Amino acid sequence: MSVGRGGTISAVPVITIGRQFGAGGATVGHMLAEALKADFLDSNII
C-alpha cells in the first residue's frame, strides 16, 4: 500500500514471475509490463 496526498491509502498491484535460468521469463516480464503500461523491475535493478 502507499499513502497519497491527503493521507489516502491506495493499493499498488504487484505481479511476480518465477522462472528458471534461460526460460525467457525476463522477456515475458518486459512484454507484460509494456502491455500493462507498468514499470518492469528486475533483480538487477532491486
Image (cartoon, grey):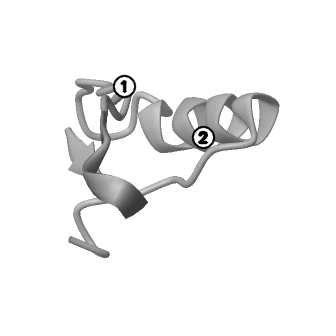
Q: In the image as oriented, which residue stretches furthest toward the bottom?
A: 45
Residue 4 seen: no
Q: Position of residue 9 (x, y in %)?
A: 26, 38
> For mark 1, what is the residue?
15
Left or right: residue 27 compared with residue 2: right
Q: Looking at the picture, how far across and down is residue 23, in whole percent?
A: 41, 28
Q: Quadrant of residue 30?
A: top right
Q: Nearer the viewer, mark 1 or mark 2?
A: 1
* Dot 2 alpha-carbon crowd within 10 angstroms: few under 14, some 14 to 19, many 20 or more: few
Residue type highlighted by circle 1: Ile
34 relative to 11, above or below: below
39 is higher (above) or lower (below) than 34: below
Tell me the element at label 1: loop
Q: Can you name the residue that lies furthest to the front here?
A: 6
Res. 41 visible in picture: yes
Q: CA distance from mark 1 to mark 2?
A: 14 Å
Tell which circle, 1 or 2, labels the residue nearer the N-terminal end. Answer: 1
- Disc 1 crowd, CA 10 A, few/some/many (<14, 14-19, 20+): few
Q: Point out the image quarter for the N terminus.
A: top left
Residue placed most toward the observer, 16 or 8:
8
* 23 or 25, nearer to the observer: 25
Across and down, in percent, residue 6 comes to 36, 57
> Of helix, strand and loop, which one carries label 2?
helix
Q: Nearer the viewer, residue 26 or 46?
A: 46
Please give the name of the residue rendered at 38% of the width and 38% of the height, measured from the top-left corner: 22
Where 3 falls versus 10 (above or below)? below
Point out which mark residue 27 bears.
2
| CB contact under 8 Å: marks 1 and 2 | no
